[in-house]
Every structure is written in C-alpha cells, then in structure tokens.
Amino acid sequence: MDNILRIAIQKSGRLSEDSLKLIKECGIRFDNGAGKLKTSATNFPAEILFLRDDDIPGYVEDGVAHLGIVGENVSVESDRDVNTVHKLGFSKCRLSIGVLREHDYAGVQDLEGKSIATSYPKLLGKYLAENNVTAQIHEISGSVEIAPSIGLADAVCDIVSSGSTLLSNGLKEVETIFKSEAVMIASKHLTAGQQDLLDQLLFRIKSVQVAKN
Ligand code: ATP
Ligand code: ZN
C-alpha cells in the first residue's frame, strides 16, 4: 500500500485526453478499458482512478488519491489542503466576468450592487473584495452564461477559452480574474516511498515537457 501511487484523473471531459496522454508519454502503461473507474499500471507501481474533476481535490486532500490532475481553477476554488506540485501546460483557460454586450461598462466599480452568476463563488468573492466591490454572488452549477439574458443576474463569472460561448449568449468579456491550466496536485501525507515515486514521475513529466519545447 505504501509503495503505490494512486493518481486521480477526470473520467470524461476536457482534461481527460491530455491527462491520459501525459501518463502514457511518461512511459506508464495501463489498460484503460472503457467505463472503468480504476486501472493498474503494468510497468510502474501506480493505479489510476477516473473521477469527476470536482471530486479530485477532496480525494487528494483525504489521501484516497495521492496525486490528481485537475484545472487550477477547480483546485483553488475547492480550497482543499493539497500541494500543487507542477503546472502541466494544457487545458489553458481563464475565469472572466462577462456582461450583456449592450451594457456600457467602464470598469470594475460598475459591478457595485449588481448580481453575478457563477460556479466559482470563492474566486469571485476574493476578486470583488480585492477591488472593494460589493456585489451579490448567485451560485449556479451549470449554464451560467444564460443568466443575464433571462434576467437571473446582471453579469456572469465563468471559464472562457475562445470567448465564443460568451458571444453566443450576447455577452462581452470585461474582466479576467484568474488564469488557469491543468496542474498536478499531491497529498500532503505521502510516505517516503510515495514521495520517491512522485519524484520519478515529475522527472519524467519534465523530460516530456522539455522534449516538446
Ligand atoms: P466533470 O463532469 O468531470 O465534472 P466538467 O464539466 O466540470 O466535468 P469540463 O468542462 O470537462 O468539466 O472542464 C474541465 C476543466 O477544463 C475546467 O475546469 C477548466 O480547467 C478546463 N477548461 C479549459 N477550457 C475550458 C472551456 N472552454 N470551458 C470549460 N472548461 C475549460
Ligand atoms: Zn466538474
């Protein structure tokens, strides 16, 4: 048990393909039979768990998984006590505030007294506090961009990559509050053996990254 690394990755979503690719590029072989929740590596003492991304920081904090690959946005928002050990360079995106296109927006002070729909209440709350703005945060879990056009909120704070989702909902991007990419997070309670395996894995990841640049 002490000498196996359990690595949690997203089961299906925007992080999945690149997470699997990274592990494979590190020379770790495993059978990823479709629909499996767990698989063992055949040539490295590791197991891979396939989970919803939102659950990964909590599993790593609890030590159920020793490592996890997750968006920095999700890790920071979760506020879990984990170590961020490496930035992985994929799934780059930003957390931005958007308002209706016709809104005459002059600056962050225009958000004073407004309502903002988001799935990231902690990151948004911190940004508003830093900018001395008091606004109402409406936490919703999905389809955030539709909120202004149906009158549910004055603005949104959501993940943007190209900006096309904002545009197609009649919104414009006015503030970027957080820049994100996939990161590797680790439990704070690794055994010496697990730390050694993590060091080996990080060495391989860095070699893969150097080879690509
Ligand atoms: P799950 O079903 O695992 O909960 P999800 O729907 O919450 O998945 P995805 O949409 O797969 O999550 O996004 C996972 C991560 O990919 C995001 O948290 C973010 O870090 C990153 N990402 C990159 N580009 C985008 C984008 N355009 N929209 C959403 N997330 C993006
Ligand atoms: Zn999720």
Image (cartoon, grey):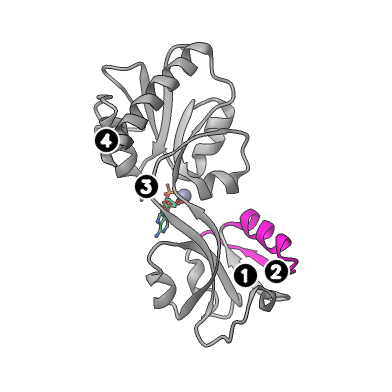
Kindly report the distance in space between the C-alpha atoms of the residues bearing marks 3 and 1.
28 Å
Q: Quadrant of the C terminus?
A: top left
Position of residue 167 in the picture relative to residue 35 (left or right): right
Q: Give the amino acid type for the residue marked by disc 2 in the picture.
A: Gln
Q: Which residue matches tag 2?
A: 136
* Residue highlighted by disc 3: 90
* Observer able to see residue 12: yes
Q: Earlier in the sequence, mark 4 or mark 1?
A: 1
Left or right of 50? Residue 107 is: right
Front in this rendered view, residue 39 or 44:
44
Q: Position of residue 32 (x, y in %)?
A: 26, 32
Mark 4, residue position: 211
Q: Does residue 87 lie above or below 67 as drawn?
A: below
Q: Nearer the viewer, mark 3 or mark 1?
A: 3
Residue drawn where x is 58% and y is 28% of the image: 62
> Helix, strand or loop at disc 1?
strand
Q: Amino acid at mark 3?
A: Phe
Residue drawn 69% across and 64% down? Answer: 128
Along the viewing direction, whichever of 206 and 144 lies nearer the viewer: 206
Q: As displayed, is residue 45 above or below residue 23?
A: above
Q: Residue at x 53, y 65 (%)?
A: 96
* Left or right, 2 with reference to 13: right
What are the residue bounds of the magenta stretch? 120-141
Was residue 121 drawn as part of the magenta stretch in this picture? yes
On residue 206, which mark appears?
A: none
- Upstream in sequence: badge 2 or badge 4: 2
Q: Residues within 10 Å of mark 3 (few under 14, many from 20)?
A: some
Gap in angstroms between the C-alphas marked 1 and 2: 6 Å
Q: Position of residue 209 (x, y in %)?
A: 32, 37
Mark 1 is surrounded, within 10 Å at the Cα level, by few (under 14), some (14 to 19) or many (20 or more) other residues, namely: many
